[in-house]
Amino acid sequence: MMTKPAGLSFPVSNNVSRMQPSSTLAAMQAADALRAAGANVVDFGAGEPDFDTPDNIKRAAVEAMRAGQTKYTPTAGTRQLQQAIIDLYAREFGADYGRSQVMATSGGKQAIFNAVVSLINPGDEVLMGKPYWVTFPEIVVFAGGVPVFIETEAAGFLLNADQIEQAITPRTRLIILNSPSNPSGRVIPPAEFKRIMELLSERGIYVISDECYLRYVYPPAEVFSAANLPMELRSRLCIAGSFSKTYAMTGWRMGYALAPRQWTQAMLKIQSHSTSNPNSIAQRAAVEAFNGPQESVGAMLAEYTVRRAWLLEALKEVPGFTCNEPEGAFYAFPNVSGCLKGALRTSGEFAQRLLDEEQTVVTDGAGFGCEGYLRMSYATSMVQLQEGVKRIKRFAEKLE
């Protein structure tokens, strides 16, 4: 009788074995598991709006299905969607892009993946500020590149040109910028962003500007896209955009990239052999998102503004917590090192015990490169915010 070989394991590729799992997805899975077990969960982990997709966008999708728009589309997306992207950037930011410089993707994450993998060779260095979105370094590792992290904690997590200049080496090929930042919520001021781009242009370094949270900026900070910059500063720039946050379309998986023609062609080659094209129905919905009424965006921003103000004040009452004011996105990123004492040594242990003892989900800052911090999403209701902070405060008080 044949026996099964003991200890047989899957031979994971070297590139994938070097990658770390997504800590944000792990937090979502933990919340789902608790809910399935019947727990009363408060979830600060999810990086998605708690609002529904606006009705006009959903209607456009229904109309697309009824009209039979359910077939393959060009890899770069439909002409209608490409034009909607071009028109929005011309209207809002005065940028002149052509169809050969625009492509639709299955979410903003795919735009970033395509951009990195099409550019990076083994050993190339890719700069990114700390804290960084968890996926940035893992895509670089997958491509065979070397993530290089720029420390920004002393500057309140605000990346600037001087920090970047000190990090540049002869092997620097690319930098990934993210403003507004996930997870810190910091927004690079337009003048500083221009300084950064001037430096990178002088050094011949490529840039990915992740503008997923572009519209969620709180005054006096300003909405700013790298597309605002002069053409000569955009010759090595790829803008990665998303419909997910702005229009509460996370599940639709729609994003896009704006880049020089040759870079776009390389990204299209990758996409043609991976997802082929984004969902045809979601593309029609995305056209309506850009071309249709925009009142829903303002309504969501107004609600996030209220939640942000309440949460920042409430966290001041939690023992051991300190928190910078986020200028954009919908996250608070408190420092919880004041709670790390005795047997509790890391922010990951804090997050796990909070989950176990208070059924409250937060994301460990170590996954974003910042041990001692937590990411808390306020893209949830005021009722959940209030209940969650009550639980966090109760837990923190027990540690004193």
Image (spheres, rainbow, N blue to C red):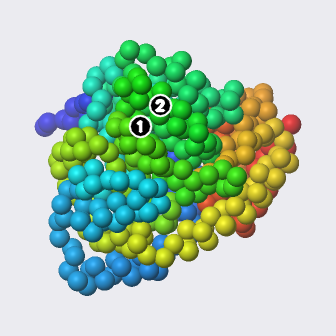
Point out residue 99 in the picture as x, y percentages from the top left corner: 25, 56
On screen, residue 117 above or below 202: below
The one of 134 and 36 positioned closer to us in this rendering? 134
- Label 2 neighbourhood size at 10 Å, few (<14), some (14-19), many (20+)? some
Residue 180 drawn above or below residue 340: below
Name which quarter of the figure residue 300 lies in: bottom right
Is residue 84 shown left or right of residue 182?
A: left
Which of the 4 image quadrants contains residue 216? bottom right
Q: Is residue 130 left or right of residue 358?
A: left
Q: Position of residue 378 (x, y in %)?
A: 65, 57
Give the total number of marks visible in the rendering: 2
Of 91 and 21, which appears nearest the observer?
Answer: 91
Disc 1 residue type (three-letter): Leu
Q: How far apart are labels 2 and 1 at the CA level? A: 7 Å
Badge 1 marks a residue whose secondary structure is: helix
Farthest residue, direction left: 1
Above or below for 142 versus 172: below
Q: Write down the residue under mark 1.
A: 233
Q: Nearer the viewer, residue 208 or 306?
A: 208
Q: Quadrant of residue 319?
A: top right
Can you tell which mark lies on residue 198?
Answer: 2
Residue 152 visible? The answer is: yes
Amino acid carrying label 2: it is Glu
Instruction: Pick the residue in front: 146 or 294.
Output: 294
Q: What residue is shown at x 22% (from left), y 76% (from top)?
A: 69
Which mark sits nearer the N-terminus, 2 or 1? Answer: 2
Horizontal and vertical percent for residue 9? 28, 32
